[in-house]
Image: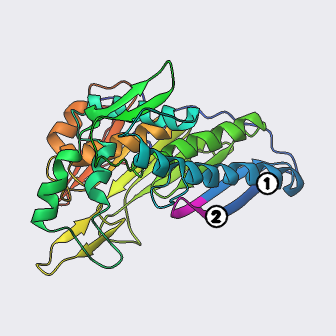
Amino acid sequence: MTSNHPWCLRAVGPALLFSLLMIPVTAQSEWFYYADTAMTTRVELELWADSRRLADPIAERVLRVFHKVDRSMSRYREDSELSRLNRQAAERPVEVSEGLFDVFRKAQTVSELSNGAFDISFGSVGYLYDYRTGVAPSEEQLSSHLSHINYQDIVLDDASRTIFYRQEGLRVDLGGIAKGYAVDLGIEQLKAAGIRHARLSAGGDMRLLGDRHGRPWVVGVRDPRSKDRNAVVLPLMNAALSTSGDYERFFIDEQGDRVHHILSPKTGKPARGVQSVSILGSDAMTTDGLSTAVFVLGTARGLDMINQLPDIDAIIIDEARQMHYSDGLQPPGPDD
C-alpha cells in the first residue's frame, strides 16, 4: 500500500517520498541546542537561527512554557491548579484556566474515541503506585478505588469554563496528555518568533517544525528492551510523534512481573500485551493521548481505531516483540 504521509517508513534511504524545500543558508545561521528538566522529564530544543543572540531569548520563552504547564497541571504539586481541582471539584463546579480546560476537553475526546481506554481519572488508582520504591496497591485497595475511574463522571461546562466531578474519590492525572500540550505550546512560541526549523521534545513527546534545513529529521523509535538500539528510524518533517512504553516508569515485583505506569482503567493494573506504541500526527496533544489509548487497547483494537482516523498513524511493538503498522505506513521492504 502506498502512503501519502511524509513519514512513510519506506522513506528511509535514498528515495524520499516527499519533496524538500531547499532554503538558502546564510553564513551566520546555525543550529542551537538547549535542554532543561520540567514536568518530571527532560526537555530538549534544537532550532535554526541567525545567531545565539536571537536564539537564546526564544529558547528561554519556549522552555518557560513547560514550567508554566507543570505549575498548572502537575498532580505532584500541592499548589498546582490540577491539585486544587482534585480537592474541590467533587464539592462544586470549579472554574479553571483556559489551558487546563482545553486539556480536559481533548482528554474527553480521546476517551470517547477509545471507549474509555484513555481515562485521565486513572489517577484515582494511579497515586497508589510508587515506582521509585517498588510499591503496588493491594487487591483490596484496588477494589475499593477502581469505581472512581470513570471519565464520564467528569463534567465540563463550556459556558462557565468549569469542571465538576460527580463522585468523591475521583482524581485526575494528566500525565498522559499534558506534556503533549506543552510541546504544542512551545511550537507556537517558535512559530510566533519566526523560527521555521526546530525540534522540540519532552520525554516521549516530540514535534518537528519544518525539515532539518533541506533534509528530513531522522527520528528513532527506541527498542523497548534496549536503551541503545532503535527499533525503527523515521524520516519526518512537520510532524508530531509520541511514544508510550512499558520501560518509562516501572519496577519488577516479587513474582518477576513488570509493573509499569500505563494502567488499564478497567483493572487499575498495568496494561498487558504491548511493549511500546508510537503515534504520528500533526499535534502532540493528540498523539500523546492516542499513544496511551492504543497501548491500553492492544494491537488489534488499537490499530482498528487508528485506521479510522485521518492523518494519524501508529507503530506498535507487542509483547512478543513483533512490530505492527497502521494502514498509512509501510514496513521497510527488502530493497530499502
Is the residue marked by circle 1 packed among few (<14), some (14-19), or many (20+) residues within 10 Å? some
Instruction: Where is residue 146? Give x, y as percent.
Output: 17, 51
Image-quadrant location for residue 154: top left
Is any atom of residue 298 visible in this view?
A: no
Magenta residue span:
36-43
Mark 1 or 2, which is nearer the eye? 2
- The answer to if 41 sits in the magenta stretch is yes
- Depth check: give the residue in front, 187 or 223: 187
Numbered disc 1: secondary structure: strand
Residue 187, relative to residue 309: is it above or below?
A: below
Residue 312, relative to residue 264: is it above or below?
A: above
Is the residue marked by circle 2 packed among few (<14), some (14-19), or many (20+) residues within 10 Å? some
Calculate the distance from the C-alpha at mark 1 to the C-alpha at mark 2: 20 Å
- The answer to if 317 sits in the magenta stretch is no
Q: Which residue is mark 1?
A: 30
Q: Residue at x 20, y 70 (%)?
A: 258
Q: Which residue is mark 2?
A: 36
- Depth check: give the residue in front, 110 or 317: 110
Kind of residue indicated by mark 1: Glu
Q: Is residue 70 left or right of residue 305?
A: right
Q: Main secondary structure of the magenta part?
A: strand
Kind of residue indicated by mark 2: Asp
Numbered disc 2: secondary structure: strand
Image-quadrant location for residue 9: top left
